[in-house]
Image (spheres, grey):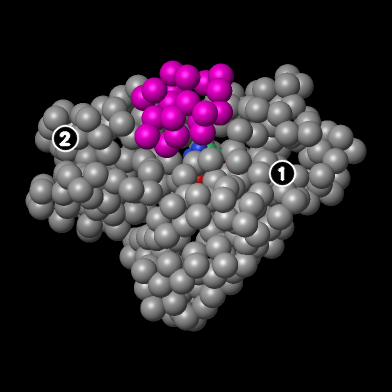
């Protein structure tokens, strides 16, 4: 029997079940062949402060990493967006499910343009905050955390006039009707948004092979490209950075942008015909070269 580790949030559990079903089908396993083991992470416990403030993405992975390396679980399912750029050598990303809609949705209004002057946008994401400030400097950004349903409820209760959520999470939670999809040319998503990944112990070759069977190669190439950009930028969860890799006519294309936190500066890159994920480093250098010294400093360069 294989043990699948996951966070316990409703979205995490849906994603864990998707992985479980795919593995059972791919390998003809009996339903009791995979047990789902929910693990409570620090990120799930601390809901009142921005992620960037309390320690970053490690909050979602640390407890799952520990359980994986201790042999309490055989593999862990994550939203790739929440997985740190630099992972321990002892842990390998073994597969990714086919990516969902990568775009953000606006909850609380029909479009960003339709928001009332001075409306309060609830988000604790540095990327979304900077993108909103750039498009609509009149809007107020207020912190808003919690899982997807909590955030929707907080907007309904008036804690904010609107919020932004990943379309992928809403789709997976069976709420495709919630919110207005924001076009990509208005809001480029977070790197890895919409992708579910599976990690296992790097030395566990049998599990790696089992997991690789359900991996979607196009998703893996695109998400690894976006992660390579983050690595080359030395970006972390404080960094207002957006990126999207796609495969178009067999060619790997990478769009990316760096923003000042207040939205006052913005540099963008759009490269097609990349040779592979590692070519993202060049896009990172192009972005940093085009940025002002202040923006470069925000990214630690
Ligand atoms: N940081 C929380 C998080 N991590 C992944 C998703 C959505 C699902 C995805 O992007 O795959 C969300 C919620 C959100 O941003 O709306």
- Using a 10 Å C-alpha cutoff, classify the residue at mark 2 as few (fewer than 14 neighbours), some (14 to 19) or many (20 or more): some
Q: Position of residue 160 (x, y in %)?
A: 74, 27
For label 2, the residue is 69
Q: Residue at x 22, y 57 (%)?
A: 212
Q: Which numbered circle lies on residue 262?
A: 1
Q: Left or right: 284 with respect to 225? A: right
Q: Residue at x 75, y 45 (%)?
A: 133
Looking at the image, the residue that sits furthest to the front is 293
270 over 166 or under it: above or below: below
Q: Residue at x 38, y 43 (%)?
A: 83
The quarter holding residue 166 reads top right
Q: Position of residue 159 (x, y in %)?
A: 73, 21
Count of numbered marks: 2
Looking at the image, the residue that sits furthest to the right is 117
| Distance from Cα at disc 2 to Cα at disc 1 | 40 Å
- For the residue pair 232 and 271, the one nearer the viewer reads as 232
Task: Residue 121: tell me if it is visible.
Answer: yes
CB of mark 2 within 8 Å of CB of mark 1?
A: no
Look at the numbered disc 2 and give the secondary structure of its residue: helix
- For the residue pair 285 and 116, the one nearer the viewer reads as 285
Q: What segment carries the magenta color?
A: 41-59
- Using a 10 Å C-alpha cutoff, classify the residue at mark 1 as few (fewer than 14 neighbours), some (14 to 19) or many (20 or more): some
Task: Residue 172: tell me if it is visible.
Answer: no
């Amino acid at each position: 029997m294989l043990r699948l580790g996951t966070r316990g949030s409703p979205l995490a559990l849906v994603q864990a079940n998707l992985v479980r079903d795919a593995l059972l089908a791919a390998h003809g396993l009996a339903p009791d062949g995979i047990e789902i083991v929910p693990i409570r992470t620090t990120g799930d416990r601390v809901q009142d402060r921005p992620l960037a403030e309390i320690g970053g993405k490690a909050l979602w992975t640390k407890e799952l990493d520990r359980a994986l390396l201790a042999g309490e679980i055989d593999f862990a399912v994550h939203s790739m967006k929440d997985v740190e750029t630099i992972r321990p050598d002892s842990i390998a990303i073994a597969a990714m499910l086919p990516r969902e809609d990568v775009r953000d949705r606006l909850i609380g209004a029909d479009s960003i343009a339709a928001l009332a002057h001075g409306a309060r946008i609830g988000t604790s994401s540095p990327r979304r905050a900077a993108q909103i400030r750039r498009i609509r400097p009149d809007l107020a950004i207020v912190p808003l955390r919690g899982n997807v349903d909590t955030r929707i409820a907080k907007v309904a209760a008036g804690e904010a006039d609107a919020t932004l959520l990943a379309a992928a999470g809403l789709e997976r939670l069976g709420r495709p009707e919630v919110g207005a999809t924001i076009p990509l040319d208005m809001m480029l998503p977070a790197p890895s948004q919409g992708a579910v990944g599976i990690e296992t112990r790097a030395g566990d070759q049998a599990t790696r092979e089992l997991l690789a069977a359900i991996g979607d190669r196009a998703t893996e190439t695109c998400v690894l490209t976006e992660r390579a950009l983050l690595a080359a930028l030395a970006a972390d969860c404080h960094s207002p950075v957006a990126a999207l890799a796609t495969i178009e006519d067999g060619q790997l294309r990478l769009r990316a942008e760096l923003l000042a936190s207040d939205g006052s500066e913005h540099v963008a890159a759009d490269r097609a015909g990349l040779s592979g994920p590692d070519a993202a480093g060049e896009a990172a250098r192009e972005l940093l070269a085009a940025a002002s010294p202040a923006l470069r400093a925000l990214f630690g360069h």
